[in-house]
Amino acid sequence: MTTPTRPPRTSLIARMRPLWPYFGAYTGTWAIVMLGAMIGAATEPLIPAMFKLLLDLGFQKHTLELWTVPVVLLSIFGVRGLAGYVSQIGLSRITNQGLMVMRRAMFNKLLVAHMQLFSDQSSSALSNSIVYETQNGASMLVNSLLSLTRNALTLVALTGYLLYLNWKLTLIVIAVFPAVAWVMRVLTARLHSLTKASQDATDSLAYVVEENVLAHRDIRMYSAQASQAKRFDQLGDSLQRLAMKSTVAGAAMTPMTQMLAAMALSTVISVALVQSAAADTSVGGFVAFVTAMLMIIAPIRQLSEVSGPITRGLAALERGLNLIEDVPRETQGAFSKPRACGEIEFRDVVVQYGAPDSAPVINRLSLSIHGGETVAFVGASGAGKSTLVNLLPRFVDLRSGQILVDGHDVGDWDLHALRAQFAFVSQHVIMLNDSIAANVALGMVLQRDKVLACLTAANLGALVTDLPQGIDTVVGHNAMQLSGGQRQRLAIARALYKDAPILILDEATSALDTESERAVQDALQGLMHNRTTLVIAHRLSTVMHATRIVTMEAGQIVETGTHEDLIQRNGHYARLYQIGLGLNNTPGT
Ligand SMILES: Nc1ncnc2c1ncn2[C@@H]1O[C@H](COP(=O)(O)OP(=O)(O)OP(=O)(O)O)[C@@H](O)[C@H]1O
Ligand SMILES: [Mg+2]
């Protein structure tokens, strides 16, 4: 499954409609902004009108009072300035509030999105969409909408004034409009596709940076800098080429519309000159007409340029909409209970990653586990152990078969209730860049005494007492300030804190030394008591305590039994045992 993309909508209005819930909520503010734009536009024809009066009355008839000139000029520009100022502020409010609402919706979707999203899109692409694209898109779109409105209104006002002055000449001006519209449409379509391509290229670039930051040590260790720099350059190069293409398309718009405007202008001036020779047009009337004509070029040009930012802004925001509306949520049922007994049943489970014809990773596996039982899973790397346990909290989807927890299909459970039943120490520990206490009590009410008790049980007590800020110490990005084993023990403390009915330990103690493991083992042993426990381990000390050992190979169960049974059977488990499992441990711990 790939993330569905919304079908291309041709009309800009139709494409903007889904954004209305985010940016349209402040109707009052919009009204003020529009009023400001209208007032601003209405003041435009006043300037040529003033010229007309100045020339006809002031210069020719000398009947104009001198004091009126500064009063009128200052009034026009005062009103105009105030209207612009208010619109600008209103618009910024609309943009920022809308941005906040949209970002929140995107982030909320991220929290409940189907897990497939995280295989389809890299973290940099997602953070790019939520953080930067929305920001740029919103300010571009909203600003250009204001520009559109202001210029369209100015155009109407000036055209109205022109019609009033000389309707025949004005018709010539109007004839230019369809040509301008056509130029805009053609170039807009091209800009849109270029924008989408550069979004993708930017994502790839960000991804390379992300990876290089993540793997900065490996890159240095294996002297891979040159190849990484080349990778970056190639992407940077294609991004630069796309940006140039975009500029070429965008830049063509201005001269083309200006040429059309110049054509109209030259015709108008010639006709007006002929007209003025024949009829008795006043000098003021002619100057006013030409001034208004020249003033009309600015809004036309700006209108022709506005489609670029609108298209770019829309494309950026549509990515956000895509995330909010089109990315599916995790599905769930309604069954819920506060605390499960911990009965688990796998029925004919098949899991395939990727294409439907790929080899199954779990192949028709059936297994039932009683409440309170401790089952250990052993098997070669890649046998499917992690996949199997990840099926339970529905981190992985089934291809076919069924999984029941307490007799209810995991798909019928309410997800929140289902996941509340598991304390999971995964193979790859991930910590948040927060305090130790917040990491341990993740998602639950923070009780400092309980946090300390869990840390002590996880054999982290000494470390925490040594830290100047104790459990309030911030652990850094993915707890990089802790050692691998400390991180693992922190994850165990988190599992202890959650105190859930089903405990899953996926190589939870693999990074610990024998002594440390033994200390943690006691705490885990206490935790396993009266609780269903699924434990994946390569060490005998953990496996030995299991009521049952399940040996897996290529996604199937090949043997089950206790340690003694399986050793006696001298099959897969016995072989694993001989070649490594438990070699660094003394049996019986
Ligand atoms: N997200 C994934 N996408 C595609 N294939 C995957 C994914 N995760 C695991 N696999 C494949 O599934 C198989 C089983 O992986 P799994 O992690 O379950 O093995 P494992 O038994 O836990 O191994 P290990 O002991 O090394 O942790 C492997 O062949 C692996 O390549
Ligand atoms: Mg694994």
Image: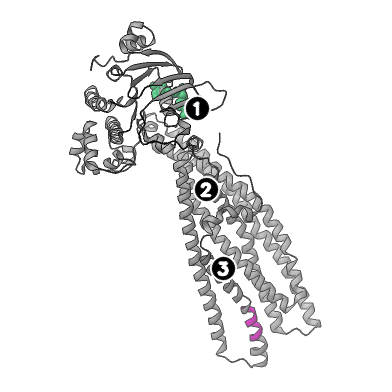
Q: Split into 4 quadrants, where in the image is the C terminus?
A: top left
Q: Inspect the image, locate mark 3, and give the three-letter code of the amino acid beneath it.
A: Met
Q: How many marks?
A: 3
Please tell me which of labels 3 and 2 falls first in the chain: 3
Residue at the spot of label 2: 320
Q: Inspect the image, locate mark 1, and give the three-letter code of the amino acid beneath it.
A: Leu
Q: How far is disc 1 from disc 2 in space, using C-alphas?
A: 29 Å
Q: Is residue 153 above or below residue 394?
A: below
Q: Split into 4 quadrants, where in the image is the N terminus?
A: top right
**Which quarter of the figure has residue 278?**
bottom right
- Residue 314 in the image: state x and y as whole percent: 57, 52
Please tell me which of labels 1 and 3 falls first in the chain: 3
Q: Inspect the image, locate mark 2, and give the three-letter code of the amino acid beneath it.
A: Gly
At a point 49% along the width and 57% down the height, the residue shown is 98
Q: Within the displayed image, which quadrant is ligand 1 positioned in?
A: top left
Residue at the spot of label 1: 398
Local packing at callout 1 (Cα closer than 10 Å; few below 14, some 14-19, many 20+) is some
Please tell me which of labels 1 and 2 falls first in the chain: 2
Q: Is residue 579 above or below residue 119?
A: above
- Residue 55 in the image: state x and y as whole percent: 66, 86
For mark 3, give the secondary structure.
Answer: helix
Q: Which stretch did the figure color magenta?
A: 47-53
Q: How far is disc 1 from disc 3 in space, using C-alphas?
A: 54 Å
1 or 2: mark nearer the eye: 1
Q: Is residue 374 above or below residue 472?
A: above
1 or 3: mark nearer the eye: 1
- In the rendered structure, does residue 116 fall within the stretch colored magenta? no
Residue 401 vs residue 484: left or right?
right
Q: Which mark is residue 34?
A: 3
| Residue 489 visible from this viewpoint | yes
At a point 65% along the width and 55% down the height, the residue shown is 252
